[in-house]
Amino acid sequence: MLLDKTSPIESKPLRLAFIENPTIGEEEILVRIKACGVCRSNLHMIEGDWLGRGFPAKLPIIPGHEIVGIVDSIGKEVKGIEVGDRVGIQPLYHACGMCEYCLTGRENICKRKLITGQSVDGGYAEYIKAHYQFVYKVPDSLSDAEATPLFCPGVTAYKAVKYSNPAPGKIIAIFGVGGVGQVALQIAKLWGARVVAVSRSKNHLRIASKLGAYSVISPEEEDVVKYFKNINYADSSIVFAPSDKVIDQAVKVVKPGGTIVLAVSGSIKEFFFYEEKTIRAIVIGTRQDMREVLKLAEEGRINIIVEKYRLEDANEVLRKLKYNEIESRAVLQP
Ligand SMILES: [Zn+2]
Ligand SMILES: [Zn+2]
C-alpha cells in the first residue's frame, strides 16, 4: 500500500500497487511479511502532520513500522539469521553505529538513524528488506499478529515503565490508558508496582481495572491532584496523553524526589527545584530494550489484544483509528 502524497485519510491516500521486491545488500535480509501493526504515528505521517519534521523522507513510500515476517533470503555477510527464521522489525530501522549515541547503546537517538516506514519503505507490503543487525527473533509462543505490537507500543511502554523506577509497592500514575498505557500497566505490575490509571475514557478505565489497576480515576469526576494528595502522592508518573494540562498534573501528583516520564511532547508549566523531581523523556526502543520486551513476552507476561484486517483495507483501518473506532490494536495481514 503505497503513499504517493500526504493527505487526509478520508481521501484514501494509500494505493494498492504492484512493485518489484527490494534487492538486498550483503548485510541485508529480505523478509516476507506476515503481519504489520497500524500505529497512530502512521496516520500522522500519511496526513502530513510530520512534514515539518521531515517525514515522509521520500515519496512514494510504504508506511508501517511494527512488522513480523519470515526471512526469505539473506545477503553474503549476514550472521546469526537463517532463511526461514521468524523475525520482527521495529521503528528503529538503522543507526550509524559510530556516533556518541550509538557507541553508548542509545542508538534510538542517533542523528543519522532511519525510521521504518518514514525514512525508508515499511511494512504495509508483502516484502521488506532490513539490515540483519536491526531485526529480532520472535518467540514461538506468540502468533504473528500478536507479536507485531511488541515492536512499537510494547517497547514504548516497556521503556516508560523502566525509567519510572518501578519497585514492589510503589505507586505509579499512568495518564492515558489506551493501547500503550494498557501495556505499561501490565509491565509495571510485573515489577510489583501499584498502578493508578487516569483517563477520560470510561472504556479505557474499565479495561485498566480488568488488567489489575490499583485504582482508576476519571478527571471529569474527580480532582486528580487531590486524589493523589490523599494517598500521599505517587512515586512516579508516566504520560501517554498529549496534553499540557495532563503533563502539569503528572508533575504535581508525584512526591518530591519522584520521576515523571514523558512519552509525548508538551510544555511544562511549573517546576520547582526544591522538590528534586526528575523529568525524563523516552522515544522508541534501542535494540537492547527490544530484546528485553521480547523476553518478557516469551514468558507470557504481556498480553496485547489485536484485531486483524486485510492489507488492502489499510485506508479504512486508518480512518477507523482516526475516529477511535478501533478497540484494540489493528494489524494488517497481506
Ligand atoms: Zn508505532
Ligand atoms: Zn549513530
Image (spheres, rainbow, N blue to C red):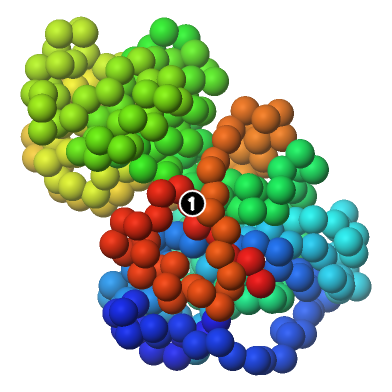
Q: Is residue 246 left or right of residue 139?
A: left
Q: Is residue 302 left or right of residue 298?
A: left
Query: Does the image show residue 174?
Result: no
Secondary structure state at the residue bearing disc 1: strand
Q: Is residue 28 left or right of residue 123?
A: right
Vertical order, 107 against 174 (above or below): below
Residue at position x 68%, y 59% in the image: 68
How many discs mark residues in the rendered view? 1
Residue at position x 43%, y 76% in the image: 315
The type of residue carrying mark 1 is Arg
Vertical order, 11 against 255 (above or below): below
Q: Position of residue 212 (x, y in %)?
A: 43, 20
Q: Which residue is mark 1?
A: 329
Query: Does the image show residue 313?
Result: yes
Q: Look at the image and tell me in which quarter the N terminus lies.
A: bottom right
Tell me where residue 223 sits by quadrant. top left
Residue at position x 42%, y 73% in the image: 316
Residue at position x 24%, y 40% in the image: 201
* Circle 1 residues within 10 Å: few <14, some 14–19, many ≥20: many
